[in-house]
Amino acid sequence: MSSRESGSGHREAEPQSAATSADVIRAEGLGKTYAEGKLRTPVFDGLDFAVAPGETVAILGASGAGKSTLLHLLGGLDTPTAGEVFVAGHQMSTLSDGARGQLRNRALGFVYQFHHLLPEFSALENVMLPALLGDAGVGDASQRARALLEAVGLGHRLEHKPGELSGGERQRAAVARALVNKPACVLGDEPTGNLDEKTAATVFELMLDLNRAQGTSLALVTHDRRLARKLDRVVELHEGKLRELPRGDV
Ligand SMILES: Nc1ncnc2c1ncn2[C@@H]1O[C@H](COP(=O)(O)OP(=O)(O)OP(=O)(O)O)[C@@H](O)[C@H]1O
Ligand SMILES: [Mg+2]
């Protein structure tokens, strides 16, 4: 579903470029070579990848395989050296920095291994922030943030600052923040990588439950095959190629 079809009032001012596909994220012929001075680091080239509406995909791969690089490109946080990324049908490379930022804020949610919550703001304020950066009013942003913090079990910690939350609580707040704009897709880079096994499983299940409830897609980098198996699809990044893993191989 394109954002224009969502019927949600605050999403109607999409950047003016033609929506071309039903995939929430699509990469075609994607390549990245880092270049700093004379040092060139080719990471991958010619990758095709797509996430359908509501679909959940795990991205596996050894350390250094390029998983974070891929996620950054899919999320428009970095620019590919080859190929194209489409988010909600919009070709990222054709958008201005401002329009790309708006689309990112509206259509995508990010959860990282480290929570990246702002230390001086409360949990509630942290979750409200992406909504306020969109076009939500304070009342609406606060209502949505409270509902999500309650959904992640932090209804009793609204006024706590990140430093006053446990590791698992901080990650749950980060999950709430990623979902506050009802994104088409959440991108997670080892979102449970810093948590103990039990807390990791809880936060992971929570992300799946919320994604299902909201119909949001999920593309998740993880090292944990047991968690990866719970998603619809598993792909592996290996020696610059992305390959679909059959169920039995995960
Ligand atoms: N800014 C950069 N400049 C140069 N090389 C980089 C840069 N960022 C990453 N790389 C290199 O690109 C390769 C892929 O890095 P990336 O961070 O995507 O790996 P990863 O699969 O996420 O690894 P990990 O599981 O350890 O997080 C690595 O070899 C890394 O050294
Ligand atoms: Mg990484």
Image: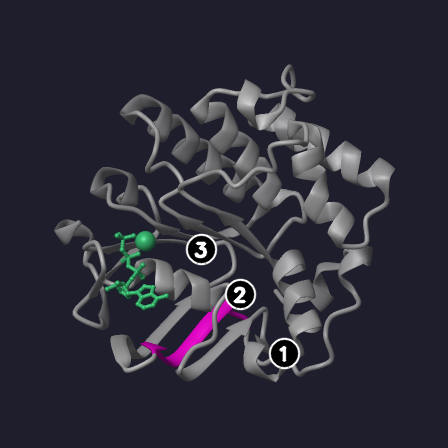
Counting residues from the N terminus, which is met first, the one under dot 3 or under dot 1?
1
Dots 3 and 2: beta carbons under 8 Å? Answer: no
Comparing 90 with 96, the one in front is 96
Label placed on residue 193: none
Residue drawn at (56%, 19%), measured in percent from left and top?
Answer: 164
Residue 62 position in % (x across, y down): 18, 55
Comparing 105 with 236, the one in front is 105
How much space separates mark 3 and mark 1, taking CA atoms? 19 Å
Q: Quadrant of residue 82?
A: bottom left
Secondary structure beneath dot 1 equals loop
How much space separates mark 1 and mark 2, taking CA atoms? 10 Å
Note whether 145 is above or below 223 in the view shown. Answer: above
Q: Residue furthest left?
A: 249
Note whether 102 is above or below 147 in the view shown. Answer: below
**Residue under numbered circle 2:** 24
How much space separates mark 3 and mark 2, taking CA atoms? 9 Å
The residue mark sitting in front, 3 or 2, is 2
**Residue under numbered circle 1:** 19
Q: Which residues are magenta?
A: 22-36
Comparing 155 with 166, the one in front is 166
Q: Amino acid at mark 2?
A: Val
**Residue under numbered circle 3:** 55
Residue drawn at (81%, 48%), measured in percent from left and top?
Answer: 136
- Majority SS type along the magenta span: strand
Q: Is residue 90 magenta?
A: no
Secondary structure beneath dot 3 equals loop
Mark 3 crowd level (few <14, some 14–19, many ≥20, 10 Å Cα) = many
Residue 22 position in % (x across, y down): 55, 71
Secondary structure beneath dot 2 equals loop
Colour theme: one colour
